[in-house]
Amino acid sequence: MVVCYDTIDVTGWLSAVFIPFDESLVTVPNMLNYTIYSTIAILLAAVVLASIISGRITLPFKRLLWGIKQSGEGNFSAKIEAVGTGEFSVIIHKFNQMNDKIQSLIVDNYETHVKEMEAELKALNFQFNPHFLYNTLNIINYLAIENNQTLISNMLVELSEMLEYTAKNPGKSLSRKM
């Protein structure tokens, strides 16, 4: 026999149950089946719960890796949606801010480069125009000298000197030289 007993605290009585040993062995196969089925159910629930929890943990990693890959390929306009309020949300928010700043710097750099190229072209044009004018005035001066036109030659020399002065001193007026 199997004896189970316990004392009741309020009354102090002792209660006992007597189970014949043969009858207790009849329930063992049922208990084994219940144990196996409950173990399988608990394992399935654990796997489902673990996949849900791991998905919530790894999803921000996957999003961040996608964003990094996009940035590595030069697509700085790609945005990552920040979900939640945890550390990953802060990291993703800062990543998006960094991409915005990089995109802004690229645009600024491009605009600066274009402005530098325009300034360089203007500087070359400013250098070219006086040189062209000096050569043209010199050719006309030689033609005037060959044709004995001293008045024209003197006027061309004065004009050439005036152009040279204004090219070297672009902000100064001519009255200061005279």
Image: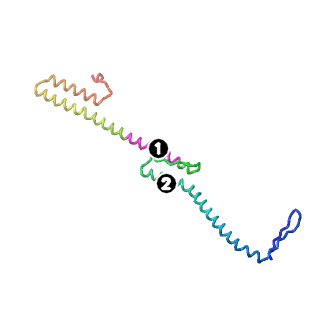
Q: Quadrant of the N terminus?
A: bottom right
User: Alpha-carbon neighbours of circle 2 within 10 Å: few (<14), some, or many (≥20)?
Assistant: few
Q: Is residue 20 left or right of residue 51?
A: right
Question: Looking at the image, do the residues carrying marks 1 and 2 touch, with CB atoms under 8 Å apart?
Answer: no
Q: Quadrant of the C terminus?
A: top left
Q: Foreground residue, 51 or 103?
A: 51
Magenta range is 93-112
Label 2, secondary structure: give it: helix
Q: Where 50 falls versus 29 (above or below)?
A: above
Q: Is residue 167 magenta?
A: no
Q: Is residue 155 left or right of residue 48?
A: left
Q: Earlier in the sequence, mark 1 or mark 2?
A: 2
Provide the residue designation for mark 2.
Answer: 65
- Residue drawn at x 25%, y 32% is 129
Q: Foreground residue, 35 or 149?
A: 35
Q: Is residue 102 magenta?
A: yes
Mark number, residue 164: none
- Residue drawn at x 65%, y 68% is 37
Q: Where 169 falls versus 115 (above or below)?
A: above
Task: Indicate the position of residue 49 as horizontal and vertical percent values.
Answer: 61, 59
User: Alpha-carbon neighbours of circle 1 within 10 Å: few (<14), some, or many (≥20)?
Assistant: few
Locate residue 167: give its quadrant. Answer: top left
- Residue drawn at x 83%, y 68% is 6
Locate residue 32: give its quadrant. Answer: bottom right
* Badge 2 amino acid: Leu
The secondary structure that most of the magenta stretch takes on is helix
* Badge 1 amino acid: Lys
Provide the residue designation for mark 1.
Answer: 101
User: Coloring scheme of the render?
Assistant: rainbow
Q: CA distance from mark 1 to mark 2?
A: 19 Å
Label 1, secondary structure: give it: helix
Q: Foreground residue, 22 or 90?
A: 22
